[in-house]
Image (spheres, rainbow, N blue to C red):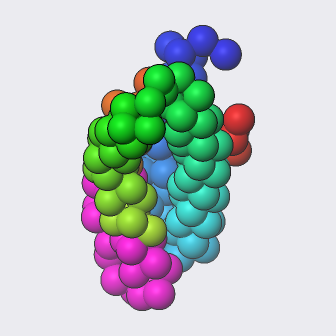
Amino acid sequence: MSPRLRAEVFASVFLLFVLALAGCGPGARAKALRSTLRSVDAARAAFVIWDDKMQAKIVDEATSLDEGRAKLAAHRAKRDDLVAAFEAAYRMLAAAIAEPDDDRGAAVVMAVASLWTAYEKITGAAPIPGAAE
């Protein structure tokens, strides 16, 4: 799937989530939250696979122990924003699920949007729900 098509598909899924939270009853809200949690889980699984491959590549291409350590440290520092974004998204989703009467929809949307932005920034690909590669 091309990067443009991936982005369009993901934007559509994200828009459906926003609409479900904004205009539907508790059943639709719960379903939207579950779907979003699955999407975040799929993105996390894809990131773990990607990150493992990147770290292995860094180690394989290092010409010395010091170079390998330095490049791994740089890679890990670069991914810190994404790890923090995953943590924030999971916290917002947990709060929204734990308090079904509380309107945390906007906070969930913002946390997930930040996660997708950080994901694309570090991996160069848009996360697609259910598409852990």
Q: For the point 31% across and 52% down, which residue is it?
A: 80
**Foreground pick, 76 / 64:** 64
Q: Can residue 22 be seen in this view?
A: no
73 shown above or below 60: below
Q: For the point 42% across and 87% down, which residue is it?
A: 99
Q: For the point 34% across and 83% down, which residue is it?
A: 102
Q: For the point 44% across and 68% down, which residue is it?
A: 90
Residue 107 locus on image (x, y percent): 28, 64
Dominant secondary structure (helix, strand or loop) of the stretch shown in magenta: helix
**Foreground pick, 26 / 90:** 90
56 shown above or below 63: below
Q: Is residue 110 left or right of residue 5?
A: left
Stretch in magenta: 91-114
> Is residue 51 inside the magenta stretch?
no
Residue 96 locus on image (x, y percent): 42, 77
Residue 91 locus on image (x, y percent): 39, 74
> Is residue 109 inside the magenta stretch?
yes
Q: Is residue 55 visible?
A: yes
Q: Is residue 112 left or right of residue 13?
A: left
121 shown above or below 129: above
**Foreground pick, 59 / 95:** 59
Residue 125 locus on image (x, y percent): 49, 26
